[in-house]
């Protein structure tokens, strides 16, 4: 809702004097920061990072610009003004340090000159702080969170269309499974696909298979699929490819364990007729990941998954006890019990 309101305000040219962009989706934060700057049309841009004080920011806002005309944009990054504050034993004691600066800025927001825009960019904020509430009241405070898979697919389709391409049916979902949900990564991978597809109108699943760089999680997904279908040689080749890419055997073991646990949890919940959306909410993962896990669960019985998890734990203990090398330990984990021994 906050993002839609910000997008709507900017499209109508309704510029505020104070903005706060925060959250986990760095790509969207950068996008809206650029949009605010573009709509501001500032003749002067001043950037403060980290240790800036309230006095410095206020002075920058109050100082007459060199040109004497036009907008001024002041960008404040990672200030920690919005961090949760520890309660003082003396509630009447005056605020000090960053808290005092945050209080000064909260008071100043209603006095910002009409030709000045202050933009705060933070990774984490406490919405209970007075400064946050002041910006939400007098300006615009927007949390940018990772998009849901269907939103990412829509965004990918729009981005491809802007570049004269379209995704073949199902190709967006394949790209998400292959490359993950980080928007910077998806944009870069889509740019590669646009170039790779040449004069073709569509980006196809084959294009993705040929040039897209799979995430480790995607490789682990395919590795487990090979294990489940008893294609041991394929599984070991995939593992050796990971080692050649300098992936740590410990990381591979950790990811295999995590994926097996996820498959087991999704299988148990699905067998209780728990809706996919509810499973995603309970496990705090994307719903398309739930779909993939449930699909993989069909290749295993619950007993096999529990045994595989116990084998992972045993392998971890043997490696850490020095009984076997990490590389060999994980390779043995990929083999059927009849081949180990």
Image (tube, grey):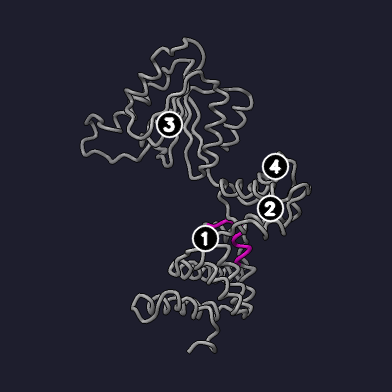
Give the mark nearest the N terminus, 4 or 2: 4
Looking at the image, residue 60 lies above or below residue 241 = above
Residue 168 picture location, percent across and down: 76, 53
Residue 100 picture location, percent across and down: 29, 29
On the picture, is 197 further left or further right than 113?
Answer: right
* Disc number placed over residue 133 in the picture, else none: 3
Secondary element type, mark 3: helix
The answer to which quarter of the image holds residue 211 is: bottom right
Q: Count residues near mark 1 (Cα–Cα under 10 Å), then give few for <14, some for 14-19, many for 20+.
A: few
* Residue identified by numbered label 2: 172
Q: Which residues are magenta?
A: 285-293
* Residue identified by numbered label 4: 158
Residue 257 picture location, percent across and down: 48, 70
Q: Are marks 4 and 2 in contact (CB under 8 Å)?
A: no
Query: What secondary structure is the magenta-colored segment mainly?
Result: helix
Give the mark nearest the N terminus, 1 or 3: 3
For the residues marked 1 and 4, what is the alpha-carbon distance in whole angstroms?
A: 30 Å
For the residues marked 1 and 3, what is the alpha-carbon distance in whole angstroms?
A: 31 Å
Residue 286 sits inside the magenta stretch: yes
Between label 3 and label 2, give the one nearer the viewer.
2
On the picture, is 153 further left or further right than 51?
Answer: right
* Residue identified by numbered label 1: 283
The answer to which quarter of the image holds residue 11 is: top right
Looking at the image, residue 292 lies above or below residue 87 = below
Between label 1 and label 4, give the one nearer the viewer.
4
Give the mark nearest the N terminus, 2 or 1: 2
């Amino acid at each position: 809702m906050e993002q839609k309101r910000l997008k709507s305000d900017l499209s109508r040219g309704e510029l505020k004097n104070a903005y706060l962009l925060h959250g986990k989706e760095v790509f969207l934060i950068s996008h809206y920061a650029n949009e605010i700057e573009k709509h501001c049309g500032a003749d002067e841009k001043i950037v403060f990072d980290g240790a800036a004080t309230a006095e410095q920011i206020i002075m920058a806002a109050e100082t007459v610009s060199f040109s004497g005309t036009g907008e001024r944009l002041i960008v404040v990054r990672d200030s920690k003004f919005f961090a949760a504050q520890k309660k003082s034993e003396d509630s009447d004691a005056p605020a000090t340090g960053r808290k005092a600066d945050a209080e000064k800025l909260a008071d100043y927001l209603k006095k910002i000159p009409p030709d000045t825009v202050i933009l705060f960019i933070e990774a984490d904020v406490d919405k209970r702080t007075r400064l946050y509430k002041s910006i939400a009241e007098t300006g615009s405070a927007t949390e940018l969170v990772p998009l849901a898979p269907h939103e990412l697919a829509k965004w990918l389709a729009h981005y491809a269309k802007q570049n004269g391409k379209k995704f073949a049916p199902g190709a967006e979902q394949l790209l998400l499974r292959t490359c993950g949900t980080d928007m910077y990564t998806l944009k870069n991978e889509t740019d590669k696909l646009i170039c790779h597809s040449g004069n073709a109108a569509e980006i196809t699943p084959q294009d993705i298979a040929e040039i897209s760089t799979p995430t480790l999680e995607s490789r682990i997904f395919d590795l487990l699929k090979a294990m489940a279908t008893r294609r041991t040689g394929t599984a070991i080749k995939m593992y050796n490819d990971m080692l050649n890419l300098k992936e740590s055997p410990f990381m591979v073991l950790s990811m295999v364990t995590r994926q097996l646990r996820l498959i087991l949890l999704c299988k148990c919940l699905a067998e209780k007729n728990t809706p996919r959306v509810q499973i995603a909410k309970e496990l705090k993962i994307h719903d398309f990941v739930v779909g993939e896990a449930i699909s993989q669960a069909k290749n295993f019985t619950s007993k096999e998954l529990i045994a595989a998890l116990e084998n992972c734990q045993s392998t971890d203990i043997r490696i850490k006890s020095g009984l076997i090398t990490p590389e060999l330990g994980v390779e043995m984990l990929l083999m059927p019990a009849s081949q180990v021994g």
